[in-house]
Image (spheres, grey):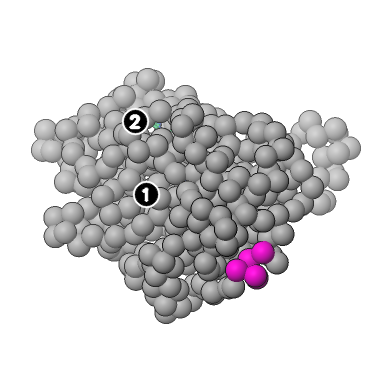
Amino acid sequence: MQKYSLFSLIRNSFTRHRNWPRAWKSVDLKQSYDVIIIGAGGHGLATAYYLAKNYGITNTAVLERGWLGGGNVARNTVTIRSNYLRPESIPFFVKSVEMYEGLSQELNFNLMHSRRSMIDVIHTYPKLREITRKMYNMDIFGATYKPISVAEIRRRIPTLTGGGANSRLPIIAGMVHPEAAVNRHDAVAWGYARAASALGVEVHQHTKVNRLLKNPDGTIKGVSTTKGDVSAGKVAVAVSGHTTQVTDTVDLNLPLRSFNLSAFVSEPVKPMIDVIVNCADLGFYLSQTAKGELVIGGVPDPGQSFRRGSNQLIFERTVGAMLELFPSFKKLKLLRQWGGTLDTAPDSSPIISETEIPGLFITAGWWGGYKAIPAGGLTFANLIATNTPHHLAKSFTLDRFKTLDYILESGTTARV
Ligand SMILES: Cc1cc2nc3c(=O)[nH]c(=O)nc-3n(C[C@H](O)[C@H](O)[C@H](O)COP(=O)(O)OP(=O)(O)OC[C@H]3O[C@@H](n4cnc5c(N)ncnc54)[C@H](O)[C@@H]3O)c2cc1C
């Protein structure tokens, strides 16, 4: 793999940057692999990378129906955090946030990772109670939630001038999560793809999996794609909101429903907010990018769908909620709005599991799964390579739906 450094940048400037090697190889699709991963998003690419790096499994093809990084990995609002409620979830997300902090060095790819802190702005006593429970649980696992006063919220976020005593919902408390961060999302996809490709993994863009194929004995045989049938000993589905569209082709019923989540971004303005602001009671969150744009997200569309656009009603509600706390943002121009398709399990926790079809694995339920890409890839690769759940993800298998051992998590940045 070409080492990216100041030296290589200077050296390539002499040839006007025309001689950089390709970041990942492009080869013909073979008829057979040890492992096929469906979906070149963050989870699929990270899984391919850790399979190669940690287990030496390199005869792997990642099949992507669109282009690399065209899915949710580059459609999300890059909030990285580990403020979860349950003892099954917190260590997993703590690990993922820690892994992100060292990932630019590991992948030799600048992810522009930036620790920001998240400030939860709280308006209701039920939310305060829920967040206080999180605080005590997180403390056990080394993640931090610290209460702050309303005056301290206003000191740290001077543009937050709404939510006063005479407002519809006055702010009653706040909580800071210092480990929360943001980074550059498409760089995560490119960084993992480049590192996996250097280890021998093949990434095939514009190769849609139309259906899964089974052997007569019921085990997985491979996939049927737009470029022909491909066989594999193991097939891993990492298609984010589209899991059921793939697994329905072998009549595998999963406890998942898909819905649309949207976000929007303002024109760039001078630096004014250096934290992630989250307001679950009103239903919006925002942060400011390194370029100065405000990235704003709201609640998911409640109806089930595979849509990728953005819902006008949700958009208007989110803007209305934001203006309650930040009235001066009324003058901001919005540049873009977009959406993505996510799937979620009934308990809002992920599924990292082998299925009832031997050799078929799924990673799904990632309604807030950008933060989980490093640990998701690490633990899914472990499961595929060893057929045993990783200790950090042992509670996330499909078995919990048989025994009703739900890991009930409510949304933090949005009301799910
Ligand atoms: C608006 C929005 C905001 C979000 N904000 C956050 C946030 O702040 N923090 C957070 O942690 N998470 C957030 N998320 C969620 C996060 O983006 C996803 O949970 C995560 O990216 C999903 O994993 P992925 O990267 O592997 O998905 P994707 O990038 O979607 O990868 C799946 C890939 O599978 C491909 N695919 C689908 N079907 C097939 C097929 N049949 N054959 C071949 N390929 C196929 C798709 O084209 C896609 O590229 C947000 C999501 C959205 C939409």
- Give the x, y percent position of residue 415: 40, 50
Using the rendered view, name the quadrant where residue 222 is placed. top left
Above or below, comparing residue 334 to residue 290 in the picture: above
Left or right: 158 as drawn, with respect to 282: right
Above or below, comparing residue 182 to residue 237 in the picture: below
Above or below, comparing residue 228 to residue 306 in the picture: above
- Give the x, y percent position of residue 282: 48, 51
Label 2 sits on what residue type?
Answer: Ser
Q: Which residues are magenta?
A: 150-154
Query: Which secondary structure, mark 1?
Result: loop
The residue depicted at 29 percent of the width and 31 percent of the height is: 245
Left or right: 392 as drawn, with respect to 118: left
Query: Badge 1 is on which residue?
Result: 416
Observer-nearest residue: 350 or 213?
Answer: 350
Residue 383 colored magenta? no
Tag 2: Cα neighbours inside 10 Å, few (<14), some, or many (≥20)? Answer: some
The residue depicted at 18 percent of the width and 43 percent of the height is: 357
- Magenta part, dominant SS: helix
